[in-house]
Amino acid sequence: MSFSQVAISIPASPTIALNEEARLLREKGEPVIHLGIGEPKNKTPIAAILGSAAKLNSGDVKYAPTDGNPSLKKAIIRYTEENYDRVVAPQNIIVSDGAKQSIWNILFAILNPQDEVIILSPYWVSYPEMVRMIGGLPVIVTPEDGSFIPSFEEIERVVGSYTKAIIVNSPNNPSGMIYPETLIAKIVELCESKNIFMICDDIYHKLVFDGKSATPAYQFTGKDIENSKIIAVNGVAKLYGMTGFRIGWVVAPKKMVEIMTNIQTQTTTCVSPVMQAAAEGALTGIQSNVESLRLTMQNNRDILMQELRSFTDVRCFKPEGTFYALPDFRAYCGTALVKNSVELSKFLLKKALVVTVPGKDFGIEGHLRLSYAGSVKDLTEGFERMKWALDPNAPSDIYIGDRKLIRDWM
Ligand code: PMP
């Protein structure tokens, strides 16, 4: 069998692959704790359920407009006005099957072969792979100072004649950090002066902690939406915990939306009207769900930090948003037990039945991405198991499910 060179070079998304592995283990009855997946445990907001149920009950579920239902677009226009302080037209919006497809559409719409996209490390696993699939070149900027936020100078240094876009994800998956306003402002200026698209992946923008906020890039441009280089991506997956509904959207200049709509007509036709009705429900219903999710995540973040502090030799920047943390486990890598973050993650799954994601997949070796989107019980028990598996100062025996286990590898 012969396949496309590009296609066979694309690895499975490590987070999705881990999810599948955990599911199979659970199916076998193993008491797996999942600190890998970025998926809040909350129930779907009632307004989303009612919206989609009404659409289903109508018995009229047909193709929808390719760029999104007008009523959902209306809700997105209001959302954009409230959260971005920008009045946009329906023609500035396109709805897709999740923010993932939104980002894919943007990249497909702008990249010629060999065009470069600047990606700031640590980064979401799918950015470089999507750029590669489309024939572009990901250019990774890794902060030299060991922080999770590259300096403006580091970013500016890699800009060249092939630079087509820069992707900014703040609050950031995997680090949980919010990029400083001064950096966002400088990136906006850079993009506008050099004619580079600034793709703002704002999927976590309201999940911010301790009174901090993630100021939208639009705040730093005097240009209107048609003339700005800023493209905003958002969706319902994270803020409303509606990962399974697969609704994302892009706010962009009209011409770009038109091109992305053409792409969508030839690939997916439209987003299911049932799911669009759900998203509309979420956006127009009571918004206290988002605030309560934010508070839950902030509380989980505090518990995670407390657990991390009691872990010998693990350091972690305190996440300012999202539901991820990226602790530094280098003290446990490069040992006889495990060489790197991939082995560490496998070791924790094998010995302690805890799912984590290796930092290597996010461009940062020696770290693990931990999600605290799950329950407090999973978080505390997951940490007890991880400490048992790795920390010589932790008690050497533990119960995992109903099995008593003794640590015999150190
Ligand atoms: N961007 C980032 C940074 C993400 O973490 C994710 C989901 N993990 C997405 C986009 C995709 O979101 P969706 O589920 O709406 O496709």
Image (tube, rainbow, N blue to C red):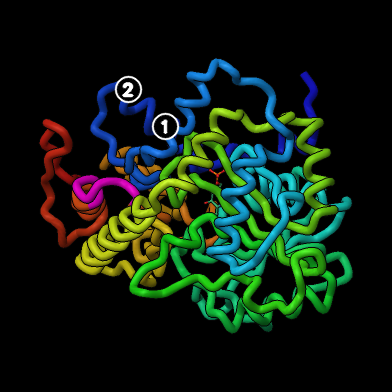
Quick one: 229 or 305, which is closer to the camera? 229
- What residue lies at 55% left-to-right and 37% top-to-bottom? 246
Q: Earlier in the sequence, mark 1 or mark 2?
A: 2
Question: Mark 2 packing: few (<14 Cα in 10 Å), some, or many (20+)?
Answer: few
Quick one: 390 or 70, which is closer to the camera? 70
Classify mark 1: helix, strand or loop. helix
Classify mark 2: helix, strand or loop. helix
- What residue lies at 51% left-to-right and 63% top-to-bottom? 172
Can you give x and y, in whole percent of width and height, for residue 173 in the image?
50, 58
In this picture, is 402 found above or below 362?
above
The answer to which quarter of the image holds residue 97 is top right
Can you give x and y, in whole percent of width and height, for residue 398 in the image?
12, 44
Name the front one of labels 1 and 2.
Answer: 1
Amino acid type at image mark 2 = Glu
Report the span colored magenta: 373-379
Quick one: 41 or 46, which is closer to the camera? 46
- What residue lies at 68% left-to-right and 29% top-to-bottom? 64
The answer to which quarter of the image holds residue 292 is bottom left
Question: Mark 1 packing: few (<14 Cα in 10 Å), some, or many (20+)?
Answer: some
Residue labelled with disc 2: 27
Q: Is residue 136 left or right of residue 393?
A: right
Magenta span has 290? Answer: no
Residue 106 visible in the current orientation: yes
Residue labelled with disc 1: 50
Residue 337 visible in the current orientation: no
Quick one: 182 or 343, which is closer to the camera? 182
Q: Is residue 173 left or right of residue 36?
A: right
Quadrant where the N terminus lies?
A: top right
Can you give x and y, in whole percent of width and height, for residue 231 in the image?
70, 60
Amino acid type at image mark 1 = Leu
User: Could you give the CA–CA distance between mark 1 and mark 2, rounded to whole angstroms?
Assistant: 31 Å
